[in-house]
Image: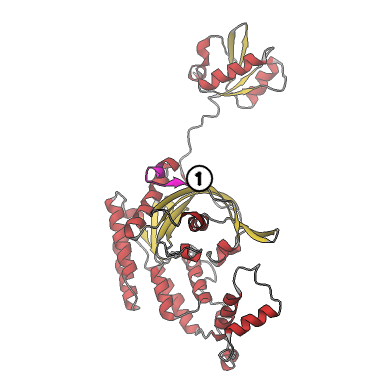
Amino acid sequence: MTALVARHGYRRLETPVVEHAELFARKLGGERLAQTYQFNFRGRDLALRPEHTASVMRVYVDTLQSAALPIRLSYSGPVFRYESPQAGRSRQFQEFGCELIGAEGLLADAETILVALACVEAAGVPRPRLVLGHIGVVIGFLDQLELDHRTQDWLIWSMERIRRNEPGATEIPSHLVHSEAEQSDPLKLDSLDRDAVVDLLRKSGVEFEAGTRTAEEIVDGLFDKGRRQNDRDVLIDAVGFVEALIASAGPPDTALARLRALVTSRNLDVAPIDELAEITRILASSGIDTDDIHIDLGLGRGLRYYTGMLFEIYAGNINGLQIAGGGRYDDLARQLGARNQIQSAGFSIGLDRLLMAAPEPPDTAIQHRILILSGEDAAVAFELARGLRAAGWIAEIETRGRSESSARRWASRNGFAATASVANGTTTIYRCRDGQEVSTTEALDPGQVMT
């Protein structure tokens, strides 16, 4: 896959396994942040990376802002998430992916999806399925409702739980709405000065430096929470809208029309629907069967930084094993300190899941494995091993000092195809399955010995 994406112009980047915890604290959704391994070392709050995108964008902000755009980068390596281990899910796993930084519009979206599909297909996964979404519809809807950030985060995070039909996914947490008693006696915040409250907390010795938010952000959050007047009926309606989006999912030819009607009925911008229609057209013209595309505006992927197109790739069918995902994130670079907004898109592939989904490779372990007996001259044994490896064998030297007969029995029990030794300039190979001896130099060919 590294060679494949290199032909598309992506060059490899390696990022640290350990990053500052703040890099992820503000950019990940609540569920993903709770899965992040965090620790303090010598006064610094650190984390094992739970994903690569934030790390790649941190490198861009630190060292690549003056480079010509677009920048195409690929990566691979382990990531860490604290979650319940099960089939296809572990706390450490391998990711491969690409980031297209400084790329605008639908061409970049389509390239990201096509490169991801090409990688999956190159690995041998038969007929992968693409789930295509767009977070822009939900973001526009939430902006229209003027919900506070905490409520917006909860609703976006809940989208995935609603898609998975998890119990309690649509239940509205009590802390997002005021009780009747709180409504009748709200906090008197309008008379308080925000800067004065920040100054008072600092003078009181409250420690902010080790946290993930500044003093100003914390106080702003408290003010927002105190003023929160979320109407439960409004939140129930918001959940209902998300459920309606999910219920409208389906093949492009039917789902796009249903979604356009739903979005129009709420007086929302239909531009995200138009973008999905154009992306689908580009994919189809590039050889992707539209029968393998599923449109779903309930796709959220549990990450805060997505701003537009989203996608996931599944093996076999959309209810099968998810092996890849990605999308557009136009605000992430600036949130991490970039001078300007940088439009970007990317994807990641779970290599462990990809191997589970791909067909099993041919079993070559038995047919090429050979044990070399050193005899009286170790140098001769090493020279024989070198020649056997050059001829295609997996050659191991016997280092336990076993006798010849004992070594042959041990090799047979432990999956070796043959044993080899040199005496008086003659190479002798014993085939383990039947004990047959071959004593010619042509026996260095593993194919001849095995047949």
Q: Secondary structure at mark 1?
A: helix
Quarter of the image with the N terminus in it: top left
Q: Quick check: is 8 in the magenta stretch?
A: yes
Residue at 31 percent across and 58 percent down: it is 280
> In this picture, which residue range is highlighted in magenta?
4-13
Residue 33 position, x and y percent, is 58, 63
Residue at 35 percent across and 53 percent down: it is 111
Q: Quick check: is 364 in the magenta stretch?
A: no
Instruction: Evaluate whether residue 275 shows in this view.
Output: yes
Residue at the farthest bottom position: 184
Q: Is residue 13 left or right of residue 266?
A: right
Q: Is residue 427 above or below residue 17?
A: above
Instruction: Out of 188 and 301, give the one closest to the viewer.
Output: 188
Rendered image quadrant of residue 276: bottom left
Rendered image quadrant of residue 139: bottom left
Q: Which residue is mark 1?
A: 356
Residue 423 position, x and y percent, is 63, 8
